[in-house]
Image (cartoon, grey):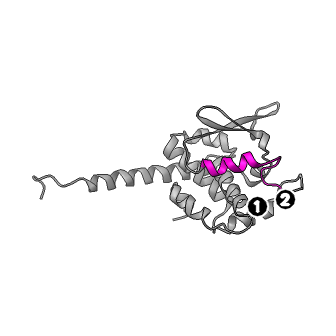
Amino acid sequence: MKDSEKGFLGWNWIKKQLDKFYGEKRLRNRALFLTTFKTGGRITEVLSLKRSNFTHDQDYIIINGMMKEKDKERKTYRPIKIPKKEPLNQEWITWVNSSRNYLFPSTELDDKPLSRIRAYQIITRTGTYPHFLRSQRSSMEIEFYGIEPNRLVDLRQWKTDRMVRVYASASSQKQAEEKMLEKFKEPLSRSNP
């Protein structure tokens, strides 16, 4: 079974991946991993983010200007809303707030983002790939937030619904397995020895 067919692997899995980062650029690398996961964006979309893209309201962290929505005449941008109650937000937001311009500049003084290749190298150090983080986010949104798969096709800008059907199927299968396990945890009644 492919990883994309397993559904969301869980917040503990995300934490284990983050623990693989160490050294001088540890915080930046963890923030890159988290931003890629939390936005569900492509690596080039993540690298284009600036501090000015982020706002918030009482319940959500809002990222403006990242996801393009195509209509017949022009491209418009829709905001991404991430619930403030989601795990691992504090470390992530600390990084966002400490950024001057680009979230992930190529150097401290440079006003250009990291290269796509460098960002890819950083994330693959954990043994996973940027696209897999995108699939994990999609599976998590289906499982935990009840987002309809057809809405994800539009949100993630997929050309077809093939991948979202894989994520939705994996999520449904995982939920069914969890319900079955819960039934087995119930004590046997006295009438059923």
Question: Disc 2 and disc 1: Cα gap in Å?
Answer: 10 Å
Identify the residue at image location x=68%, y=49%.
94
Above or below for 162 versus 193:
above
Q: Locate residue 132: give its quadrant.
A: bottom right
First in residue order: circle 2 vs circle 1: 2
Give the structural element (helix, strand or loop) at label 1: helix
Determine crowd level at label 2: few under 14, some 14-19, many 20+ residues with C-alpha closer than 10 A. Answer: some
Question: What amino acid is found at the position of numbered circle 1 in the picture?
Answer: Ala
Q: Residue at x 76, y 40 (%)?
A: 53
Q: Which residue bears the numbered disc 1?
A: 119
State whether residue 9 appears in this view: no
> Tag on residue 69?
none
Instruction: Between residue 10 and residue 158, name the one nearer to us.
Output: 10
Against 72, is 30 above or below? below
Tell me the crowding category of disc 1: few under 14, some 14 to 19, or many 20 or more residues within 10 angstroms, Cα based: many
Q: Quadrant of the C terminus?
A: bottom left
- Where is mark 2, residue-wise? 106
Q: Nearer the viewer, residue 123 or 78?
A: 123
Region of the chain picked out in magenta, as a range? 89-105
Query: Label 2 amino acid?
Result: Ser
Q: Pick whichever, 32 or 100, lies toward us.
A: 100
Q: Is residue 92 magenta?
A: yes
Residue at the farthest right position: 110
Residue 108 picture location, percent across and down: 85, 57
| Relative to 72, residue 116 above or below | below
